[in-house]
Image (cartoon, helix red, strand yellow):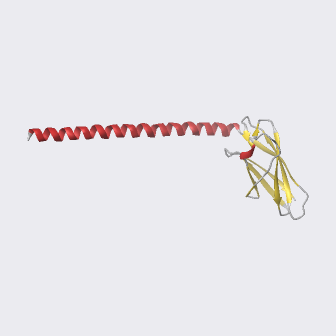
Amino acid sequence: MGFELSVVAAIFFLSAVVLGSFSYSMLTTSNEIVSDASEERYEMQNSKLKTNIEVTDAIAGNYSDTYNLTVILSNTGSENVYFDELNVLVDGNLEPYTYSDVAATWTPAETRNLTVKGLSGTGIHRVKVVTRNGVSAYNSYIV
């Protein structure tokens, strides 16, 4: 009976050691994931605070059935913005756009134009430009 008790105690001890090592490795891994996510969140917030754009003008081209909209934008923040990663919404609809500049990196204090082609409708419209980190700017125009 003494030998059996020793074997059972050894099995429980080994089980506790194995379970403890698995728990430690899982806690360490999850702590690293939380730490990485916190760092990434800080970087995103910092980038968002430094980003600012302004729609200085929105000019509708000659209207027939459709028109082209030229949007003049200024980077008034201190963060580079990637011009090819903007979202342009006209009256709440996501629209494709083109830009004539060669470089996609839009530096601070720089003004750029983009063109949205094939829009329709008359009256007052609203254009919204959103950067990849969520900073947006609005303007209205009349066709």
Q: How many marks?
A: 0
Reply above or below: 89 against 107.
below
Residue in the foreground of this view, choosing between 97 and 57: 97
Q: Residue furthest front?
A: 102
Reply above or below: 46 against 138.
above
Q: Measuring 42% from the left and 36% from the top, which residue is drawn there?
A: 28
Residue 16 horizontal side relative to residue 6, left or right: right
Q: Quadrant of the C terminus?
A: bottom right
Q: Position of residue 60 (x, y in %)?
A: 87, 55
Residue in the foreground of this view, choosing between 111 and 100: 100
Q: Position of residue 68 (x, y in %)?
A: 85, 56
Q: Position of residue 43 (x, y in %)?
A: 61, 36
Which corner quadrant of the image does residue 141 belong to? bottom right
Reply above or below: 6 against 92.
above
Which corner quadrant of the image does residue 110 belong to? top right
Q: Residue furthest left?
A: 1
Q: Measuring 80% from the left and 41% from the top, which residue is drawn there?
A: 102
Q: Position of residue 47 (x, y in %)?
A: 66, 38
Reply above or below: 28 against 55.
above
Q: Quadrant of the N terminus?
A: top left
Q: Measuring 74% from the left and 45% from the top, which residue is drawn there?
A: 84
